[in-house]
Amino acid sequence: MWLPLLLGALLWAVLWLLRDRQSLPASNAFVFITGCDSGFGRLLALQLDQRGFRVLASCLTPSGAEDLQRVASSRLHTTLLDITDPQSVQQAAKRDVAHFGIRVSIVEPGFFRTPVTNLESLEKTLQACWARLPPATQAHYGGAFLTKYLKMQQRIMNLICDPDLTKVSRCLEHALTARHPRTRYSPGWDAKLLWLPASYLPASLVDAVLTWVLPKPAQAVY
């Protein structure tokens, strides 16, 4: 009874792997990537360029664009784009995206060591926010709250932040080049073991765990 089920599951797994590994050939079509100054965007742009794709890489700063262009081939072209500025977006991407025939893949990475997760930058931002709080609000939290929070943040980030950015860029590359891209990608061990399972748990349970882990304000009621 169990043997046919096991053989069926094995056959399904093999067929899924073969289907998952089918990729599209490099073509003259452009791949447009934002945020290519550093991190995932820069790494993906270089990977696709090495595979022979024509890449249009947008950067926030001229120095980021120049640095990327220096190490890329002539197939890669850079453009300046601030995605928070609507006018900048209109200037950089003038073609409307078609609303039909487009498959959407969602990439939900865990924590990786990028400029966004830089501890020094995060701590400066939190300290600046703390300094802007009224004295009465600071008193509610207590003078030691920020120090405890920063120490906890440092321990957590050092534990879960993965230095291997290729885990994310490989997922992005697969989503762009596979004949049968997946609907969702969850690169990083914390995404698979923490954040994805947590998204299916009751919110009250997740809140209870965070309340237990994070430091409490001095005047907390529970």
Image: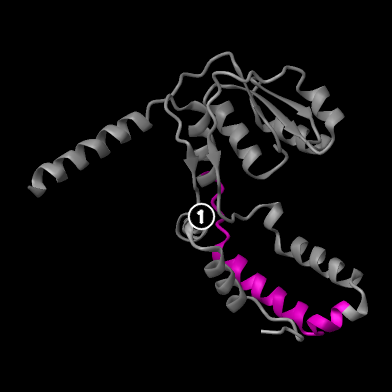
Dominant secondary-structure state across the stretch colored magenta: helix
With 6 as the anchor, is 53 left or right in this view? right
| Callout 1 secondary element | helix
Residue 157 lies in magenta, yes or no? Answer: yes
Residue at 71%, 52% (x, y): give it: 115
Q: Between 140 and 92, which is closer to the camera in this rendering?
A: 140
Q: Position of residue 136 (x, y in %)?
A: 90, 80
Residue 150 lies in magenta, yes or no? Answer: yes
Instruction: State which quarter of the image contains the C terminus.
Output: bottom right
Q: Give, as a three-letter code, the residue at label 1.
A: Ala
Q: Which residues are magenta?
A: 137-166
From this view, report whether residue 15 is shown above or below residue 73.
below
With 12 as the anchor, is 202 left or right in this view? right
Q: Position of residue 141 (x, y in %)?
A: 79, 81
Q: Which residue is mark 1?
A: 191
From this view, report whether residue 34 is shown above or below residue 191.
above
Residue at 61%, 75% (x, y): give it: 211
Q: Position of residue 44 (x, y in %)?
A: 59, 36
With 92 as the anchor, is 27 left or right in this view? left
Q: Position of residue 98 (x, y in %)?
A: 64, 18
